Amino acid sequence: MITFVSRIKARAAATFAAFMLGAAGLVLPSAPTLAADDVAILGLWPQSGPYADVGPLLNMGAVIALEEVGYKVAGKKIKYVTRDSETKAGTAARRSQEAIDSDGAKFVIGPWASGVALAVTEVSKKNKVMYYFSGGTEDISGKRCHRYAFMWAASPWTAMDVNLRTFKKTHPNAKTIYMFVVDYAFGWSLQKYVEQLAPKYGLTVVGVDRHPLGQREYSSYITKAMAKNPDAVFMINFGIDAISAVRQLHNFGYTPKKPVILSWSSGVEELVQMDPAMRANLQVGTNYYYTVDTPENKAFVEAYKKKSGGVPPGYAPAAGYGLMKMTLLAMQKANSTDPQKAIQALEGAKGKNFVGDFEVVAKTHQTVRPFFVLKTKVEKDMKDKHDFGTIVDVSATPQPADLNECKDIGGF
């Protein structure tokens, strides 16, 4: 594990995924038949496909949460099973159903892509199992809401509002932004709110280019953007897509002269794969950064670093950890592993966890929690090789109720 960082930088995503599988314990042996005193939880993670590099990290976070409780909850042993979502809606739905049928899964967390989650949420509803997702689509807690599904990531509205607010605060003379948007449910949700909110901060969107998931060549988009001479490029993409775009923007000479906003970033997992010069003038919005100052987060960071060879966690492992923690919390509060009782116990719940204060909105099942904005550091200001940035703004402002499309979350 001591070559973890160098391998991330040197190899493509597929190689990185293969390296991490063993460390994260993502591929598990076939589990025995579910005993009466067991409860099965499914971790649905991308082991292959465009987010294959992220799957092991999501799983590692979930495993840490399980280790904290000794694989026990509400008087039962936890049987943790995993399946490969492949970042394909049909595959993820089918494998979720298989885990429910063959392993008796009553609780599901994952996958990673929003479009895939929209298929999985229907499986959870059909089978009456509790489902927790972390991603950018607002539909899970919006127009596709139902009683069995919950959202862990911040609302897209919350995230885009604080991104624009921070940019205007740090660049008061800025007037224009140009957008790169990944072309699926995640990108659409966030783009909508940027376009709605930009005028509030005196900003005009002067151009938008949508690109497919897995895009590696951005020169045509960058040429169009530079012709508009925007004050910032505002990106709504993720992982290798975001890394490729930042690298090419730097090669074109756009950065570090002008800022790039990574509005919904994985944080560490992206920044560690960029050279210091490339990340010298970035604003990074993320659901998690490892310097969050809570006792629980400090413990999580130390546990993760022991598994990763010293690399701190980014959004992916924090999401796996957070999804599992909230699922366990539901069972703990209910003192039951019955999904319906766990759901009822979590609705309206408030408290503190590793990212700060949270509330689960009963009417929508949206988890209201902090969203963080970082300013990246130039190399000379970094305290160590993982000191990528400083948290400069935080928001837990909920989406205005009239914008939420979950009109009736329904019953069981």
Image (cartoon, grey):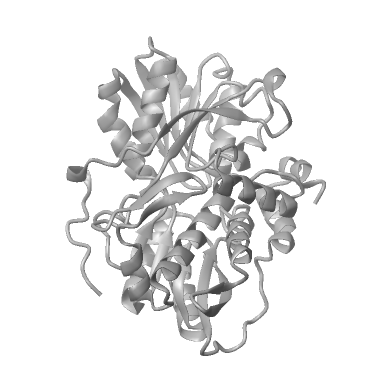
Q: Foreground residue, 372 or 358?
A: 358
| Residue at the image point whose x is 46% and y is 44% from the top | 356
Image location (x, y in percent) of residue 361: 29, 54
| Residue at the image point whose x is 61% and y is 63% from the top | 68
Q: Foreground residue, 212 or 143?
A: 143
Please say whether residue 167 is visible from this viewpoint: yes
| Residue at the image point whose x is 32% and y is 72% from the top | 125
Lateral position of residue 363 relative to residue 126, left or right: left
Please say whether residue 230 is visible from this viewpoint: no
Q: Is residue 91 above or below residue 139?
A: below
Q: Foreground residue, 408 or 122?
A: 408
Q: Is residue 345 above or below residue 1?
A: below
- Locate the C terminus and report the quarter of the image it occupies: bottom left
**Seen from this angle, which residue lies furthest right?**
2
> Splitting the image into 4 quarters, where does residue 188 fall?
top left
Q: Is residue 294 above or below residue 412?
A: above
Report the number of discs: 0
Image location (x, y in percent) of residue 325: 50, 60
Q: Foreground residue, 38 or 74?
A: 74
Image location (x, y in percent) of residue 165: 36, 24
Lateral position of residue 167 relative to residue 12, left or right: left
Image location (x, y in percent) of residue 149: 34, 64
Q: Is residue 241 above or below residue 284?
A: below
